[in-house]
């Protein structure tokens, strides 16, 4: 399974936010937890329905979004 296949978007779940495997756990929840210093192991303990590859998928998804971001210089 491709890691990004774990990321799903369904307008009926969390108003269409990207989630992990259709669960009510959003990608941004995972990223926010990691940014707050919560370890992947702690996340997996808090959300037993998650798998280690789900956390990797959330990080890969965030990377792909940022990778395609375009930045333009704006002169003052």
Image (cartoon, grey):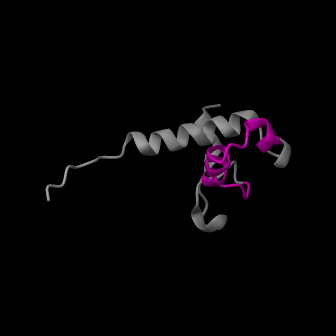
Q: Is residue 31 magenta?
A: yes
Quadrant for the C terminus in the image: bottom left
**Residue reaching furthest to the top:** 1
Left or right side of 32 for 42: right
Residue drawn at point x = 65 percent, y = 42 percent: 6
User: Can I make out residue 48 in this image?
Assistant: no
Report which quarter residue 26 is drawn in: bottom right
- Residue 5: x, y in percent? 61, 40
Q: Is residue 66 magenta?
A: no
Left or right side of 32 for 41: right
Quadrant for the N terminus in the image: top right
Report which quarter residue 39 is drawn in: top right
**Residue reaching furthest to the left:** 75
Secondary structure predominantly adopted by residues drawn in magenta: helix
Residue 31 versus residue 11 in the image, above or below = above
Report which quarter residue 56 is drawn in: top right
- Residue 54: x, y in percent? 69, 39
Residue drawn at point x = 58 percent, y = 63 percent: 16
Left or right side of 3 for 72: left
Count of marks overlaid on the render: 0
- Residue 30: x, y in percent? 66, 48
Residue drawn at point x = 83 percent, y = 48 percent: 46
Residue drawn at point x = 20 percent, y = 49 percent: 73
Residue 37 versus residue 25 in the image, above or below = above
Extent of the magenta region: 23-44
- Residue 2: x, y in percent? 60, 32
Q: Nearer the viewer, residue 73 or 24?
A: 73
């Amino acid at each position: 399974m491709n890691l990004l296949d774990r990321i799903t978007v369904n307008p009926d779940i969390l108003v269409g936010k990207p989630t992990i495997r259709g669960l009510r756990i959003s990608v941004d929840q995972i990223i926010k937890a990691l940014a707050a210093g919560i370890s992947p192991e702690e996340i997996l303990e808090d959300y037993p329905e998650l798998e280690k590859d789900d956390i990797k998928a959330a990080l890969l998804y965030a990377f792909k979004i940022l990778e395609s971001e375009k930045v333009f210089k704006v002169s003052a």
